[in-house]
Amino acid sequence: MTEPHAEQPNTRRLLDCEDCQAGPDSGDIRTISIGRDGAVKEIWHTDQCPTYTIERILMEASAAKVKEQDARAKEAFPAAHSRLREAAATLPASAAAGPFIAALLELVQAQAEDTTRFVTLPTWAEILERHFPPKDSA
């Protein structure tokens, strides 16, 4: 099976900066970004380019925001996880809701075991198949 984006051509767009007019032969700094379409956009800048300065300021501000969000989440997650477990323990053991509650608790526990990464797709599949096994086709 091929990846969903495998059919898309891997295009590379080399652009001169509209502000400083730098290109590969005259630029000091190269920025590279990948668009949602998979195209790689490469732009050259001089070190005094106002566009590059703005991009750098925005990138640093975004990095600071992500660090703040991460710190808040690391503080909030354990308490929220505990509240989820407590709430699940108070629910009646319903045959209909049981597998959903158990799967949710197990998925959240898998994330809690390592908050520096996302729960991988194979882990999701393993947990969901355990709680919602495939029906026999026989």
Image (cartoon, helix red, strand yellow):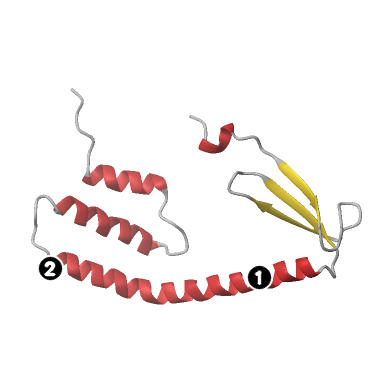
**Amino acid carrying mark 2 in the image:** Thr
Residue 23 lies, in percent from the top left, at 86, 53
Q: Which residue is mark 1?
A: 58
Binning the other alpha carbons within 10 Å of mark 2 as few (below 14), some (14 to 19) or many (20 upward) gives few
Give the residue drawn at x 47%, y 75%: 71
**Number of marks drawn:** 2
Q: Secondary structure at mark 2?
A: helix
Q: Quadrant of residue 7?
A: top right
For residue 90, the mark is 2
x and y, in percent, of residue 43 in the image: 77, 54
Residue, x 43% and y 64% (percent of image)?
A: 115
Nearer-the-camera pick, 68 or 34: 34
* Residue drawn 79% across the image and 70% down it: 50
Q: Nearer the viewer, residue 30 or 41?
A: 41
Secondary structure at numbered mark 1: helix
Taking 60 as reference, is 130 left or right?
A: left
The reply, left or right, for residue 75 in relation to residue 82 is right
Amino acid bearing label 1: Leu
- Mark 1 or mark 2, which is nearer the start of the sequence? 1
Residue at horizontal 27 percent and vertical 42 percent from the top? 129
Query: 132 above or below 106?
Result: above
Q: Observer-nearest residue: 68 or 33?
A: 33
Of all residues, the one furthest to the right in this rendering is 26
Residue 107 image point, x, y percent? 31, 56
| Mark in the foreground, 2 or 1 | 1
Quadrant for the C terminus in the image = top left
